[in-house]
Image (spheres, rainbow, N blue to C red):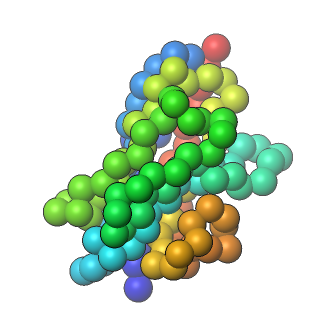
Amino acid sequence: QVQLVESGGGLVQAGGSPRLSCAASVRTFSNYNMGWFRQAPGKEREFVAVIRWSSGITYYGDSVKCRFTISRNNAKNTVYLQMNSLKPEDTALYYCAANMGLAVRTLSDYDYWGQGTQVTVSS
């Protein structure tokens, strides 16, 4: 069982650069791909970013590419999402997720989810 707890959200001005964290309670954190998704009011949950456990290769959603950076610290069982140049359309509930499979870009690929942390971007 994997428990995920996100933190770092809040109210941010447009152009801001907050960093989200997701702490995992699992012995073998380094064996999990770690992803971030987000869900805005009235919209479906969408893929934001993922970092693979073995290679450290990262993938990003088109809407955040070149603005957001995902990273992980296996010694701390934590994955981060550095968000830069925030826009009001980045306002959403941000979720951390974990899986051990090959597919990593869709909701159904993930076995474990956190409760989410709200990010609200004011213009």
Name the quarter where the N terminus is drawn: bottom left
Please tell me which residue is depicted at 23% across the width and 63% down the height of the picture.
Answer: 74
Instruction: Name the one closer to the observer, 112 or 68.
Output: 68
Q: Is residue 90 visible?
A: yes
Which residue occupies the foreground of this view, 54 or 94? 54
Determine whether 77 is above or below 26 in the image. above
In the image, farthest residue toward the bottom:
1
- Quarter of the image for residue 41 reads top right
Q: Residue at x 78, y 54 (%)?
A: 44
Work out which quarter of the rendered image holds the C terminus and state it.
Answer: top right
Residue 28: x and y, percent?
Answer: 27, 79
Q: In the displayed structure, would residue 118 be above or below residue 107?
A: above
On screen, residue 103 versus residue 108, left or right, reads left
Residue at image point 63% right, 53% down: 47
In percent of width and height, residue 55 lies at: 34, 63
**Image coordinates for residue 42, horizontal then vertical, percent:** 82, 46
Q: Quadrant of residue 120?
A: top right
Q: Position of residue 38 (x, y in %)?
A: 62, 49
Left or right: where does residue 8 sit relative to residue 46? Answer: left
Q: Is residue 10 visible?
A: no
14 vs 34, nearest the viewer:
34
Residue at 62% x, 45% y: name it: 61
